[in-house]
Amino acid sequence: MGRRPLESNAPAWRDALIRWPVALATLFFFLLVSWLLYTQRIVEAMRSNSEALSEFLAEVQAASQSPDPTAAETALFRLREMIVATGVPLVVTGPQDTVLIVENLPFDVDLSTPDGQERTRRYVRSLDLRNPPVGDPNVTHIHYGDTPEVRGLRWIPPLQVFGILLIVFVSFTVLREQRRAAQERAWTSMARELAHQLGTPISSLQGWLEVLRLTPDERPGDLGEREVADAIADDLERLERVSHRFELIGREPELEELDVRQLLAELEGYIRARLPRFGAGAKLRVEIAEATPPILGSPVLLAWALENVVKNALDAMAGRTGRIEIRARQENDLVAIRISDTGPGVDPEIRDRIFEPGITTKSGGWGVGLALSRRIVEGVHGGRIQLLDGRPEGATFVIRLPAKV
């Protein structure tokens, strides 16, 4: 037996929202890779600086133990080379702030000119704000800046904050668009369902109007005005019931004590009267355990919710031979109503979304019946409706409602 096919009535442009999670994941991946690469670069630079420092200490140790008088001078020359290689800005000043030596400045300067001296001194003041100079200002003062790696690290906190804010913004936008899409899909499905339910009695009324326009001899089956009036009354009652149902959906109805046996008896009568049209080969069985307690609820809305689930089972069976079973019993402080069918079951791809608006198991449907049932059971009555797993065939829906104690 085949599975119930997936049908979705969501607008096609809403499919673009599916790409938002992909874009968000791509953004996460890009930020993560960039952070890892930059971190690795810093680690390698620090490792290189550590190696250079170790080499310098080794040379200083060797120079201190060497009888060669030029060994110390050689060690100092090597130190200067190592400092230059690290990229650390370095300025050596003498008495009266005279600039003597510069290395790794972010600009070219001629120390032999007053402008060059003044420009370098301004730069020295900016270095001293971050790192206090070392040495004797009456002899030589050494001013130094940060390594390129440290300067690069200053951008990390702002970039992290920007990345977090960007991700939060994108996530908020995605959630808002998805919620808006779900709301629009729900309202669209609701409007189509209302039009569908109103369409049948309206079409019937149009037909009876045509009958009334005929002369008594032209009417089929010798229909009298009494029979036509009764049929019109039935259609008007159905229109009133449909409008009352949809009116209650947007309001908080008053809950009253309901007898589960009576509620299911009325549902059984409604379904049996329509079995020849909905499911000619289906058999209906209703079982209610003794001493099943009453519940608090809206008889109009609960009847609608149960009717939608049973109609879903009939649609799934599609006229094939089978049975629908409705059982009610008490489970602790709840009343459980199980509706089972022997149809093809629910496609695993939509099991988790079967109660979403716009998802239907039949072609031509609006996918609002089970969504309405969940809203009525859970939103209005504080109960729970779910599709049970573990059946080899068919489907079982269970509705649990608080018992009136």
Image (tube, rainbow, N blue to C red):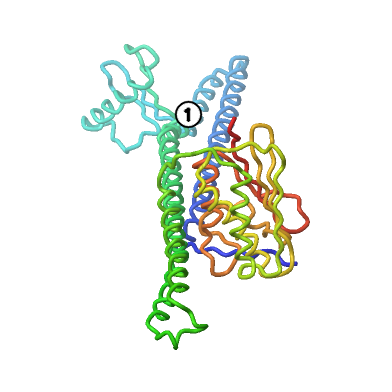
Question: Splitting the image into 4 quarters, where does residue 267 fall?
Answer: bottom right
Is residue 269 in view? yes
Q: Which of the two residues, 137 or 128, is positioned nearer the viewer here?
A: 128
**Disc 1 packing (10 Å; few <14; some 14–19; many ≥20):** some
- The residue at 67%/60% (across/down) is 347
Q: Looking at numbered disc 1 in the image, what kind of residue is underneath it?
A: Ile
Which residue is labeled 1 in the image?
Answer: 83
- Quadrant for the C terminus in the image: top right
Percent x, y for residue 4?
66, 64
Question: Image check: 97 left or right of 43?
Answer: left
Q: As displayed, is residue 346 above or below residue 200?
A: above
Quadrant in which the N terminus is drawn: bottom right
| Residue 71 horizontal/vertical position (percent) | 56, 21
Q: Give left or right: position of 82 versus 124.
A: right
> Closer to the camera, 3 or 207?
207
The residue nearer to you, when weighing 44 against 321, is 321
Instruction: Point out residue 241 in the picture as x, y percentages from the top left corner.
Output: 45, 57
Residue 313 x %, y %: 65, 60
In the visual, does 161 lie left or right of 362?
left
Up/down of 100 relative to 229, above or below: above
